[in-house]
Structure formats: structure tokens, C-alpha cells
């Protein structure tokens, strides 16, 4: 019942079918027929890998069709405005095991293929009664609509597939904690100095026998150390999710078959947490209010009225020990600064001519009567002179090859030294700390260049050389048995 459309053909029999600018038979809609739902999912899995659904989501519908023989098939009907888009969709549908049709209303014909580059047309319009009459070169079948399928509900029913590589890379995470673990996890993250936000989520009771909602803590963590991965993923009551779009996250170790970032329904303002192990997803119509961990950490409040402190009673002296610098057996790391004594400054001036532009831009220098202190960023070149220092903190330096004892954190060291803000502390070998204002450091390329005079090179012209240049005469002769016979030797 189908015939090929010829080039420059002007008359078509199929209702709703017309020729576009390229002479291709195209209806107002396209229909993709799939034998089952999993083939429809395969189509969306391939389609969303290369392009989003933003321009199609408002113009498509999914329906479950039933033929007169009782077979059920799935139809994706989308409004088409150009044959180029229909070409792409027909190619993906064929890859997923479906068929592509074009038309509108009740009558649909097979979309163009290699056998008919300009499409197909009906040789005779059928009078059969059905919601959709589909005509293919291999079959002709009528279908009635059994029910419509909601696309978002279909994606929510899809179970993520097991993928050990999913979530292996570092990045932001969502952690869902049961109510009994939320407080402990909050304080653990706070003690570990992990930046995070937390909110309290509620879901309806799990059964009609319960009257209290299900409450869980939801943590938003931009990043955490790799050593915590096993703790979070193996602790019962904690579920870790990788965000795949602004409104969806998939559990670590699983991957959703659809690229959810291409679906507008999963871009907020709510959140859908897709669980692994075949469990149903958890949907939040709206994200809860998220607060920082510092705002929610437990605070001890003093009881009673404040009183004037009494005179301290005689007791044991405080337990305090001096800070020491000890040679370290470990290889020095983070060597990023050098102290150059005043006697070496002339050598420093000569070496500056050999530095590249990247080092001159990234290095900073502070000069005092005690010498110069030169700092560089990670990966930059450091001059081979002076006494090397490594950075314990951005504002705390110790000699390379040494470590502090006791081994307290740099934050405690800075608070014990009690230096003003905006200062750099340098712990020297002799135990005398130096303090340099951060404002004293300037860019190396700014500090070294003199704009007042030119320094001419010490050169000598060729005419000023003493005496004329002798001409070189070459003689070629056989050295003989005694090549050193004409060399005179003085002394015994």
C-alpha cells in the first residue's frame, strides 16, 4: 500500500502529509514505535547523550498502544518542524529497535530511508477504524490508545545499573543519614574540618500503622578527603550520592541509564535521590533549608550570673614546654622560600638576569637590613642560593630539613606566637623568629627593575685589540717515527 515519493512530486494522497523545502514527505508529527518500554528507554539513553530534551519535552507524548491482535507496543509522538530533526530521531529509533513514521491524526506512513530518500506515500487511503493506522513496507496495522505514560514517572521507575567506577572520582557529594546518625556525622565533619551544609528532610510514614514522618539528615559536601570514602559507603544508615544534575543524584557505585542533566524535570527546585539495590527513589518536592555546620554545632551555655573571678590560688605551675626545631629524617617538601644574606645580594642581582618570565611574575620579595626573603609559588623555579625554607602554612615558614617539636598544627603555632594579622612568621635555625609584614612583599619583577639608567655592556671593539691578528698557516707533512723529535725538554 506504500509507494515511493519521487523528486518534484507535488500530489500526495496521505492526509496531513506534505513536502518540505527539500522535497521530503513530512507530516506535522513524527511517531516512533517500540516493541517494549525498555526499547523506549534505550532510545532516550542514546538521545540524551548528545542533546537535551528541552525543546522536545513540551511537544512529545508517550502512549501505550494496543492492536486488534492484543499486542501492546509503545509509541513516542513528537511534533516535528524540520526533516533534519526527524532524520536524527529515526536513526536513533532504528538503533534502539524501533520504527519511524510521519504523518498526523489517524494516518501514518513509514519515514524515509535509503530505499526511498524522499519518503513514502499511500497508494490508497484505508477505511479501517483505529486511533492510529500505521503503514510500513513490512506491515500495516491499526492501534488504539490504551493509556498515556508520564515521562518523568517512567524515568523515576528506572533502576540505576551497578557501575563500580561511578563516583570513583573526587567531587561534590550528597549524604543521606538516618536520624540517629545525623548528629554524630555533623560533629565528625566539624572536627575533621570538612566544609558542608545540612538540612532535615521529611517523608510520609512508611505504613498506615505509623503516625510519625520519616526524618533523615541531608548533607551537601563540596569535597571531603579520600580516606572517608570507605567510612561513608560502608556505614549502615549512611547513603552517599553523586549529583548528576541540579535536581537529581545517584548513589555511589550506580549509574542511571538516562543522562538526567538533559531532562528539564530533574533540574530543581526539588531533589530526587536514586537509590541502588533496586530500591525506590526518594523524591523531595523542595530542598530543605540547609545550614552550615558551624551554626549547628553544640554550644555550651554557662548557668547562673557571671561572677568576678577570684584571685588564683597557689597551685602547680602550668604545663608549658618551649618550641624546638629538630632535624628531620624525611625529605623536605614544599620548599618555596629562601633567605638570602646581605653578602649574597650582589650574586642575586646577577642571577636575576637568568630567570624566566614565569618565575619573575610569581615570586615575591621582601628586603630588609638582614637580607632578602624570596617566596615562590608551587612549581616555580627557586634560585640555587641562600637558606631554603618550607611553608607549614601560608604565613609560617621553617628551615628546609627541620620540623617543629612538639608536632602541633600550624594554626596552634601561629596562635602561640601571637603575631599581628597580615604578617609572615619565619622560624630561623638560631631560634629567633622573624616577623615580616605581608605588605612588605612585592612582585619580583616590580622590585628588581631600575628605570633611571641603562647599564651598558662591557665590550671591546675589534679595532682596539692589541696588534694585528696573525694569519694562520697550515702545513701537512708526515710526522715520522718520532713525532716529538723537535720538542725541547727543560731540566733532567
Image: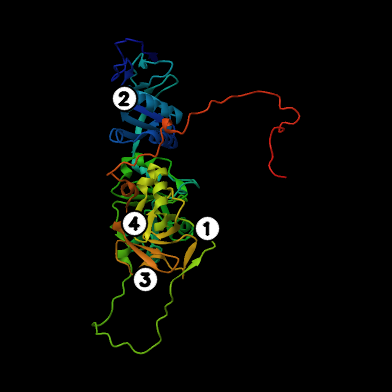
Looking at the rendered structure, which numbered label has been put on residue 331? Answer: 1
Q: Which of the two residues, 398 or 373, is positioned nearer the viewer here?
A: 373
Q: Please, what secondary structure does the residue beneath circle 3 have?
A: helix
Residues marked 4 and 3 touching at CB (< 8 Å): no
- Examine the image and state in which quarter residue 179 appears: bottom left
Mark 3 or 2: in front is: 3
Residues marked 3 and 2 touching at CB (< 8 Å): no
- In the rendered image, is residue 477 in sight? yes
Compared across the picture, whether 164 is left or right of 393 comes to right
Mark 1 or 3 closer to N-term? Answer: 1
For label 2, the residue is 106
Mark 3 or 2 closer to N-term? Answer: 2
Q: Please, what secondary structure does the residue beneath circle 1 have?
A: loop
Cα gap from disc 2 to disc 4, whole angstroms: 87 Å
Mark 4 or 3 closer to N-term? Answer: 4
Residue at left offset 44%, top offset 37% = 38
Task: Quadrant for the C terminus, please.
Answer: top right
Tell me residue 234's x, y (percent).
Answer: 49, 58
Tell me residue 341's x, y (percent).
Answer: 41, 58
Residues marked 4 and 1 touching at CB (< 8 Å): no
Q: In the figure, 94 relative to 409: above or below?
A: above
For label 4, the residue is 367
Tell me residue 468's x, y (percent).
Answer: 48, 29
Cα gap from disc 1 to disc 3, whole angstroms: 27 Å
For label 3, the residue is 416
The residue carrying pointer 1 sits among few (fewer than 14), some (14 to 19) or many (20 or more) residues within 10 Å by Cα, namely few
Mark 4 or 1 closer to N-term? Answer: 1
The residue carrying pointer 3 sits among few (fewer than 14), some (14 to 19) or many (20 or more) residues within 10 Å by Cα, namely few
Mark 2 or 4: in front is: 4
- Examine the image and state in which quarter residue 357 appears: top left
Cα gap from disc 4 to disc 3, whole angstroms: 26 Å
Amino acid at each position: 500500500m506504500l509507494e515511493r515519493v519521487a523528486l518534484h512530486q507535488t500530489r500526495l494522497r496521505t492526509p496531513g502529509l506534505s513536502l518540505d523545502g527539500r522535497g521530503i514527505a513530512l507530516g506535522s508529527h513524527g511517531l516512533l514505535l517500540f516493541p517494549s518500554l525498555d526499547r523506549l528507554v534505550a532510545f532516550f539513553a542514546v538521545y540524551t547523550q548528545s542533546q537535551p530534551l528541552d525543546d522536545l519535552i513540551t511537544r512529545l507524548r508517550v502512549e501505550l498502544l494496543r492492536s486488534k491482535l492484543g499486542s501492546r507496543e509503545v509509541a513516542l509522538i513528537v511534533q516535528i518542524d524540520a526533516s533534519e530533526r526527524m532524520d536524527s530521531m529515526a536513526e536513533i529509533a532504528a538503533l534502539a529497535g524501533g520504527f519511524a513514521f510521519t504523518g498526523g491524526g489517524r494516518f501514518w506512513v513509514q519515514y524515509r530511508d535509503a530505499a526511498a530518500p524522499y519518503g513514502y506515500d499511500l497508494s490508497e487511503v484505508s477505511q479501517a477504524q483505529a486511533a492510529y493506522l500505521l503503514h510500513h513496507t513490512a506491515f500495516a496495522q491499526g492501534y488504539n490508545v490504551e493509556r498515556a505514560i508520564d515521562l518523568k514517572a517512567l524515568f523515576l521507575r528506572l533502576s540505576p545499573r551497578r557501575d563500580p567506577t561511578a563516583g570513583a572520582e573526587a567531587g561534590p557529594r550528597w549524604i543521606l543519614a538516618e536520624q540517629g546518625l545525623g548528629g554524630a556525622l555533623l560533629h565528625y565533619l566539624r572536627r575533621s574540618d570538612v566544609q558542608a551544609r545540612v538540612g532535615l528532610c521529611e517523608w510520609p510514614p512508611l505504613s498506615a500503622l505509623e503516625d510519625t514522618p520519616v526524618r533523615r539528615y541531608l548533607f551537601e559536601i563540596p569535597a571531603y578527603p579520600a580516606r572517608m570514602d570507605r567510612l561513608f559507603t560502608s556505614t549502615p544508615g549512611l547513603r552517599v550520592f553523586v549529583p548528576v544534575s541540579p535536581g537529581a543524584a545517584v548513589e555511589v557505585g550506580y549509574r542511571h541509564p538516562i543522562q538526567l542533566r538533559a531532562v528539564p524535570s530533574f533540574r530543581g527546585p526539588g531533589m530526587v535521590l536514586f537509590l541502588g539495590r533496586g530500591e525506590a527513589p526518594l523524591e523531595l518536592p523542595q530542598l530543605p533549608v540547609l545550614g552550615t555546620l558551624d551554626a549547628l554545632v553544640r554550644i555550651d551555655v554557662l548557668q547562673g550570673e557571671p561572677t568576678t573571678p577570684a584571685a588564683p590560688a597557689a597551685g602547680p605551675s602550668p604545663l608549658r614546654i618551649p618550641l624546638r626545631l629538630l632535624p628531620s629524617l624525611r625529605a623536605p617538601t614544599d620548599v618555596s622560600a629562601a633567605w638570602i644574606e646581605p653578602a649574597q645580594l650582589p650574586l642575586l642581582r646577577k642571577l636575576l638576569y637568568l630567570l624566566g618570565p614565569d618565575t619573575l611574575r610569581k615570586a615575591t620579595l621582601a628586603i630588609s637590613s638582614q637580607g632578602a626573603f624570596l617566596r615562590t609559588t608551587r612549581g616555580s623555579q627557586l634560585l640555587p642560593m641562600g637558606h631554603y625554607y618550607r611553608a607549614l602554612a601560608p604565613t609560617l615558614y621553617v628551615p628546609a630539613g627541620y620540623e617543629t617539636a612538639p608536632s602541633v598544627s600550624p594554626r596552634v603555632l601561629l596562635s602561640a606566637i601571637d603575631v599581628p594579622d597580615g604578617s609572615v612568621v619565619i622560624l630561623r635555625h638560631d631560634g629567633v623568629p622573624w616577623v615580616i609584614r605581608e605588605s612588605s612583599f612585592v612582585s619580583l619583577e616590580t622590585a628588581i627593575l631600575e628605570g633611571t639608567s641603562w647599564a651598558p655592556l662591557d665590550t671591546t671593539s675589534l679595532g682596539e685589540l692589541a696588534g694585528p691578528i696573525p694569519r694562520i698557516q697550515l702545513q701537512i707533512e708526515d710526522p715520522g717515527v718520532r713525532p716529538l723529535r723537535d720538542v725541547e725538554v727543560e731540566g733532567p
